Image (cartoon, helix red, strand yellow):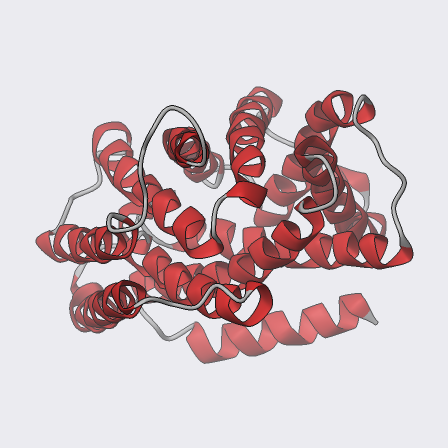
Amino acid sequence: MLRRAWRHLRSAVHRRTAHLPPTVQGLLWSALSVTVFSGLNAVARVLSQGLDSYQVQFLRYAMGLLVVLPFVIRHGAAHYRPQSLRGHLARGALHTLGLTLWFAALPRVPLADLTAIGFTTPLFVMLGAWLVFKEQMHWERWLATMLGFAGVLIVVMPQVSFSTSGPGLYHLVMLASAPVFAASYLLTKALTRHESTGTILLWQQIIIAGLSLPLAVGVWQPLSAAQWGGFLACGVLGTLGHYGLTKSLKVAEISSTQSVKFIELIWAALLGWVVFADVPTLHTLAGGLLIAAATIWVTRREARIGGARPPPAG
């Protein structure tokens, strides 16, 4: 049933987007990924309130592996044999390091703040895409990203103190994860040149779960039925989110997809309000409006001129 539903969903998405320029397709896949990850972050934050971050990190990816196993069984293990195991290992190690920092901060930082601080990642990604992949940094992308980052600053700066003790320490921990995740995404982009989306997704789950297991063993706590259900939801959401992210990197230049990531702040503020009673401030609303305006503008701009640009290599 799950495979059939996924096949119908993927077919419907392909029919509706195949005629669009590659950059717009990348933006739409990225928007799907951002929306799903927002829900994942909210569920993970609830689970992290009563469990150690290492256990949460391991179970999140172990459940993701459980979700993709039916597809592996159906297509056969040979279908997912990697072309570059070293690349997958390097990417998995980097992502595990970023996740370790991220999960350490997760239960101690408000969801909107946590999301906003993570938005330094697109800046590192864009710089890396320019330096490593020699992508052309069109002014529209820079402007949209800078406007999005300005929206983040409007939200975060009035309420965050980057001290080296107390709550501010965990904001710094979250900030430290940003360049690590950026390096992981750049490696993912490199892998999309010769690996399928499914292969990248499967090996990500295997490697991160494997590297996280030793960290989780020493802090393991028994789980309730509700917690197991929550982690299964994390596995489904995380798999879908990473599928959308990898597809966006495969069909478009990585720099073109970064501005849309800032809409995650809007979702985070809404979920923080509904789930955790974190009432959005005027700064959050103002910053969210600026982020939304920048995202809508660059999407429309890329749609108009995307057809005039050559598709990305690989």
Quadrant containing the N terminus in the rendered view: bottom right
Is residue 54 found left or right of 163 in the rendered image? right
Residue at 76 percent of width and 57 percent of height? 230
Q: Give the image quarter of residue 58.
A: top right
The one nearer the camera, 143 or 229, is 229
Quadrant containing the C terminus in the rendered view: top left
Could you say where residue 294 lies in the image, as x and y percent from the top left? 20, 66
Is residue 277 found left or right of 284 in the rendered image? right
Count numbered badges in the picture: 0
Does any portion of residue 50 appear in the rendered image? yes
Kindly give the residue lying farthest to the front in the view shown: 166
Could you say where residue 286 lies in the image, as x and y percent from the top left? 23, 68
Residue at 60 percent of width and 70 percent of height? 10
Is residue 206 found left or right of 227 in the rendered image? left
Q: Is residue 161 above or below residue 94?
A: below
Is residue 234 found left or right of 135 in the rendered image? right
Q: Give the image quarter of residue 19.
A: bottom left
Residue at 22 percent of width and 56 percent of height? 154
Does any portion of residue 81 appear in the rendered image? no
The one nearer the camera, 253 or 139, is 139
The one nearer the camera, 14 or 289, is 289
Residue at 15 percent of width and 50 percent of height? 142
Could you say where residue 188 lies in the image, as x and y percent from the top left? 47, 37
Could you say where residue 193 lies in the image, as x and y percent from the top left? 45, 39
Q: Is residue 46 above or below residue 279?
A: above
